[in-house]
Image: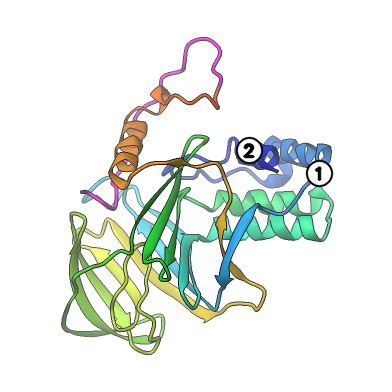
Amino acid sequence: MRSLILILHMGILSLCTITVRAQSTAQNPMVNTMIQAVKMMKIDTIAKEVIEPCLYRAYYRSDYHPVAKSSSPSYEWMQLLQIGKTAQRYLDYGTWQADSILDDGAKTKKAPEEFIPKYYKARKTSVVDSHILFLQTTGTMEFFSQIALDHFTYVDSLPEQSWTLVSGDSIVAGYACHRAQTHYRGRHYTAWYTEEIPLSYGPYKFRGLPGLIACIYDADRDHVFTLQGFERATPEEMIYRKMKSYFKTTRLRLLQAIRHYMANPGGYNTPKIIAKGKKTPKPPKPYNPIELE
């Protein structure tokens, strides 16, 4: 299954790069390559370690400006917070949707032509190749990310923000919200939380308020997360950890590696990529990390 996933992901994934909209899947040679690859090997469900059932889903729109304090360029995509009794998982909605499509295709033994185009389309809506797992039982957070074809992970304590509740009310996604502020990893944030959903979670690593965070943004509005919907999960949905070969690192080392990659994408080396001849120089990619320190 690892070989299959590698084939499916090559040419699709690149850490923290902004996904370019692809041509229609019906005309895309990558889709045909993926279909042929699936036909040549036995497909299985994604290797995973189930943590616990997912009880709720919170959908967030993420708005990101890769050039600091500039409204252009701007990128927008959907992310998902899965909420269980003692665990939560935060990831791009496109990634979750693609994994679900692949699992369903394997379980129901569908022909590759039936689900690979849908898988590809879902993956193309994913912008960042990272996800976060929060575990209350151990008091830890596991962060997973990717640079080119290399997978990285680090373990940290559950995030904590020192919140100040301030005056102000608003309506977000139909929910009555109150205002709070905090400073986290080099940025000052304003958050709007709703006590109508008494869950102390939110997008990315934000949590600890007396209700679900419905909207949060930094002072420059370079990173904005806005709730789009909240619902009960289906009975069969699980929160899980993907089983892959991860390189264990630390938060600061991973941040540094990402900065280096974005500054010089063509200079990134990995034994998983065999380049013939000279590498083609690639221009730096604009990068405005959510964590500045």
Q: Is residue 136 toward the left or the right of residue 188 in the image?
A: right
Image point (65%, 79%), residue name: 235
Give amino acid for label 1. Answer: Lys
Q: Would residue 290 be counted in the magenta stretch?
A: yes
Residue 137 position, x and y percent, is 43, 70
Q: Earlier in the sequence, mark 2 or mark 1?
A: 2
- Residue range of the region highlighted in magenta in the rendering: 274-293
Question: Residue 42 — which label?
Answer: 1
Residue 216 position, x and y percent, is 29, 69
Q: Would residue 31 be counted in the magenta stretch?
A: no
Q: Quadrant of residue 265?
A: top left
Q: Main secondary structure of the magenta part?
A: loop
Give amino acid for label 2. Answer: Leu
Q: Secondary structure at mark 2?
A: helix
Question: Residue 22 — which label?
Answer: none
Residue 85 position, x and y percent, is 49, 78
